[in-house]
Amino acid sequence: MTIIASADGSALGNPGPAGWAWYVDDDCWAAGGWPHATNNQGELTAVLELFRATAHLDDDLHVLCDSQYVINSVTKWMPGWKKKGWRKADGKPVMNLEILQELDAALAGRRYRFEWVKGHANHPMNEAADERARAVSEAFQNRTPIPTGPGWTRGGAAAVAPVPGIRGVAASAPVAAPAAPLAPAQPDLFDFDELSGELDELTPESAGWHEITLTLSPDEHARLLGRAHDHGLNAEEFLRSLI
C-alpha cells in the first residue's frame, strides 16, 4: 500500500515562533515546534517526523510538500553534501545540519517519493498541514497549549516517545526496510522557501548591503502577494521577513 501524507512548516517572523505538521487525515496527524526557529527547520522537521511516525510500516510513502528547499535537499543536494563532509560546493557548512542528518538516517531503506504541490492554493491536504503547523507557531507566540495531534492512528501503530531537544514532538523509533527509494517527482519552479534557504546563509560576517533581483512570472507574483497577505505584510515586507 501507499501512504499519502502532506508535510509543512511555519515560522512567524522567520525566524520566530515555529511549527511543523504532517497530515494524513483528520484522525491521523501530528504537529510540534519551537519558540524560535526558521520556516526551513519546520519544513524539514515535518518530513522527518512523518518518516519516523511510519518507520514501522512496510508501505510506500508519497509525500506532498510545497517546499522545493526540502525536496531538493533530499533528492538533489544531500548526496553531494555527504561526499563533501556535509559542506556545500563553496565549502561552507550546510545549514540545518542536525535535522538533515537525522532525515538522512530516517530515509535509509524506505520506499518514498516527493510531489511538489503549490502552497496556499486550496490543496486540501497541504492546507490541512499548513493550518496545523501555523497553529503551533501561534500557540508558541501566544503561550497557549501546543496542539500536537493524535499521531499515527492507523493499523500497526508503533509506540511513540518524545524526541530530545524538540518541544511538542512525538515520533516512533526508526526501523529500516530493505528497499530502494522510488524515483522522486519534483518541479523546476521558483519557490519562496528555496529563496529563504539561500537568505538563511547570509551571516553577520558578510558585511554590507546585499542586492537581490527577482524576475517573477505572473503566477509567481500572485503567490508572493498571497503569502504576504497571509502574514499581514506587503510584498517587500514579506521578502524582508525571510531574511
Image (cartoon, helix red, strand yellow):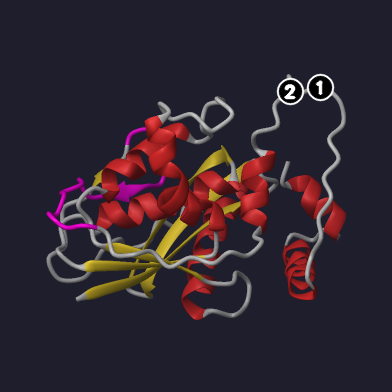
Can residue 172 be found in the magenta stretch?
A: yes
Q: Position of residue 50 (x, y in %)?
A: 33, 57
Can residue 55 be found in the magenta stretch?
A: no
**Residue at the extreme top of the image, as rendered:** 205
Q: Nearer the viewer, mark 2 or mark 1?
A: 1
Residue drawn at point x = 31 percent, y = 40 percent: 163
Residue type, label 1: Ala
Q: Position of residue 165 (x, y in %)?
A: 39, 33
- Residue 180 shows up from this direction: yes
Residue drawn at point x = 61 percent, y = 44 percent: 197
Residue where numbered disc 1 is placed: 207
Query: Label 2's element?
Result: loop
Above/below status of 25 relative to 234: below
Left or right for 89, reference 97:
right
Residue drawn at point x = 43 percent, y = 30 percent: 86
Could you tell me which quadrant the C terminus lies in? top right
Residue drawn at point x = 52 percent, y = 26 percent: 93
- Residue 166 shows up from this direction: no
Above/below status of 150 relative to 146: below
Query: Label 1's element?
Result: loop
**Residues marked 2 and 1 touching at CB (< 8 Å):** yes
State the extent of the magenta-drawn residues as a range. Answer: 164-180
> Dividing the picture into quarters, in which one does residue 205 lie?
top right
Q: Position of residue 79 (x, y in %)?
A: 38, 42
Task: Give me the C-alpha separation between circle 2 and circle 1.
Answer: 6 Å
Nearest the viewer among 131 and 200 is 200
Marking on residue 204: 2
Nearest the viewer among 99 and 177 is 177
Rate crowding at label 1 as few (under 14), some (14 to 19) or many (20 or more) other CA atoms within 10 Å. Answer: few
